[in-house]
Image (cartoon, helix red, strand yellow):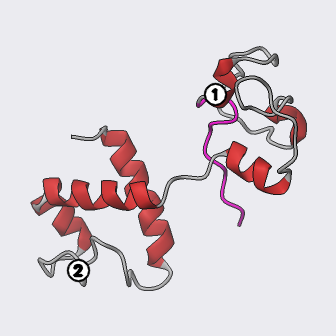
Amino acid sequence: MAEYLDVVRTKDRMCDMYMSCGCSGCPISQYSNGENEHCEAYVKDHPAKAERKITAWGEKNPEKTILDEFLENYPDAPLDQFGAPKACPNTVGYPDLSRVCAGGGTESEDCLGTCCWGQPAKKKR
């Protein structure tokens, strides 16, 4: 089974995407899940099937990272030997990182991980 937290986070992203349109197109909605059950009941009654559908959706719709967002805006930004921008995310407009930079603000393989550039991009509302 996939990591529980990954599945829950992916389900939350999926719900955020489909909820505004009445869940139309959501793979676990009662209209799509093949059991004609509300999604919460479907997840409870058919956890393995729900997990497969959620995981498949997540693979087709990967979560955008702050690196992805940064490179969309600055495609020619110089990158270090690890493929991360030569700047700490905190210094270029991403001050709300949930973890302290493991690289200490220096070039490091950690910069591409979940501590820095690999963190999910925050939704703009």
Above or below 23: residue 16: above
Magenta span of residues: 114-125
Where residue 125 sits, quadrant-wise, is: bottom right
Instruction: Name which residue lies at 23% across and 80% down.
Output: 30
Depth check: give the residue in front, 81 or 72: 81
Check disc 2 and report the residue beneath it: 30
Where residue 33 sits, quadrant-wise, is: bottom left
Q: Amino acid at mark 2?
A: Gln
Depth check: give the residue in front, 20 or 92: 92
Would you say 82 lies left or right of 8 here? right
Q: Main secondary structure of the magenta part?
A: loop
Q: Secondary structure at mark 2?
A: loop
Above or below 120: residue 31: below
Q: Is residue 62 a member of the stretch shown in magenta?
A: no
Above or below 11: residue 81: above
Q: Position of residue 47 (x, y in %)?
A: 16, 55
Q: Quadrant of the N terminus?
A: top left
Q: Is residue 120 a member of the stretch shown in magenta?
A: yes
State how far apart marks 1 and 2 are (Cα).
37 Å
Q: Position of residue 97 (x, y in %)?
A: 71, 35
Label number found at residue 115: 1
Q: Earlier in the sequence, mark 1 or mark 2?
A: 2
Above or below 111: residue 96: below
Q: Position of residue 111 (x, y in %)?
A: 69, 25
Label 1 crowd bin: few (<14), some (14–19), many (20+), radius 10 Å: some
